[in-house]
Amino acid sequence: MRTDDEGQRVTDLVIETSGLRKEFTSRKGRRVAVQGLDLAVPAGGVHGFLGPNGSGKTTTIRMLLGLARATRGEMRLFGQPVPRSLPDVIGKVGAVVESPKFAPNFTGRQNLLLLARSIGIPDSRVAAAVETVGLTGRDQDRFKSYSLGMKQRLAIAATLLKEPRLLILDEPTNGLDPAGIREIRDTIRTLGESGVTVLLSSHILAEVQQVCTSATIIGNGRLLASGTVEQLLGEGTSYRVAVPDAAAATAVLTAADLSCVAAPDGGGLLVETDDPAAVTRALAGAGIWLTELTPLRPDLETFFLQLTAADNLGTSTERDAR
């Protein structure tokens, strides 16, 4: 652990949790929403916080923001313990956790100006936020005329007024049509590239993979996997090979002790190997020239399903939680 000149903890992690646990008690017993969660979100880029509905994502976010109390465990934002030091760091954090509340008869810009002036932020920040989320030209329209995707982008713009270093988005594409999902995805990608750390909570893994640089996957409130997308998916050992004569290529590759089958979609051959150069050597030696040699990796959704194949996803119930 490093400290600065004033003895404050210095870390390259924007969000840290250790042994985080949240229990709820009801007439049916004790329900454990989050159990022993260790979360580490590095500075910069987009970090996917992934899992099915009911897996504890929103509960974790609410604890980080001081909206719910942890049963036990530790949490830090920018190296500072929360909720104790939340007042010291909350100015660096923007969050869209619930449906935004805006005046329906005000324009998007009027809503943002009203918010900016209420918290002492210069009006110039409004134009910058509108441009970042791609609402330029539509900011003069009334909020009630906005599509759901535009409303979500306005909510993100509102969090950007104070220029946060961390932006937390909880299921921002819920209920959106494909066009709205694309708009939010482009906004998130732009923010991640600008230096803002984005924690993106979602259960739509295929969509998230397009913008995430790292990810944490949870199920039943437990950590299942965490790391960069490349680390999670690993280097593929399966390659798609396209050749003019698939039958001849299959014979050559099989003779070279390379596992080779026809691709299920009819798109060439699938070859299992740790050495793709062996494929080109074998085919070239037989006078067969390939037109494609593409490594295949599982996507996040496939990886997640494999990871949780034996798990009953969702929240868990413990009548005598420890």
Image: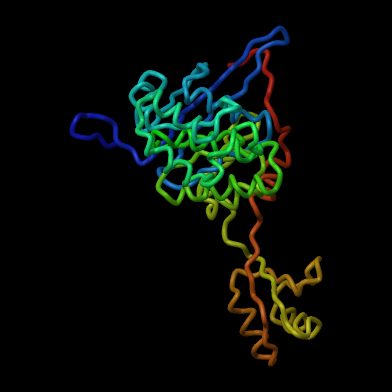
The residue closer to the viewer here, 248 or 218, is 218
Q: Residue at x 55, y 29 (%)?
A: 106
Where is 220 relative to 228, above or below?
above
* Residue 35 appears in view: no
The residue closer to the viewer here, 65 or 109, is 109
From the top left corner, tell me how far across and down residue 307 is, in percent.
66, 44
Where is 274 relative to 12, above or below?
below
Total labels: the figure holds 0
From the top left corner, tell me how far across and down residue 29 is, in percent.
69, 11
Scheme of colours in the image: rainbow
From the top left corner, tell me how far across and down residue 226 is, in percent.
53, 43
Where is 195 relative to 75, above or below?
below
Q: Quadrant of residue 2?
A: top left
Where is 210 relative to 109, above or below?
below
In the picture as drawn, the residue positioned furthest to the bottom comes out as 287
Q: Residue at x 49, y 50 (%)?
A: 190
Instruction: Locate the N terminus by quadrant.
Output: top left
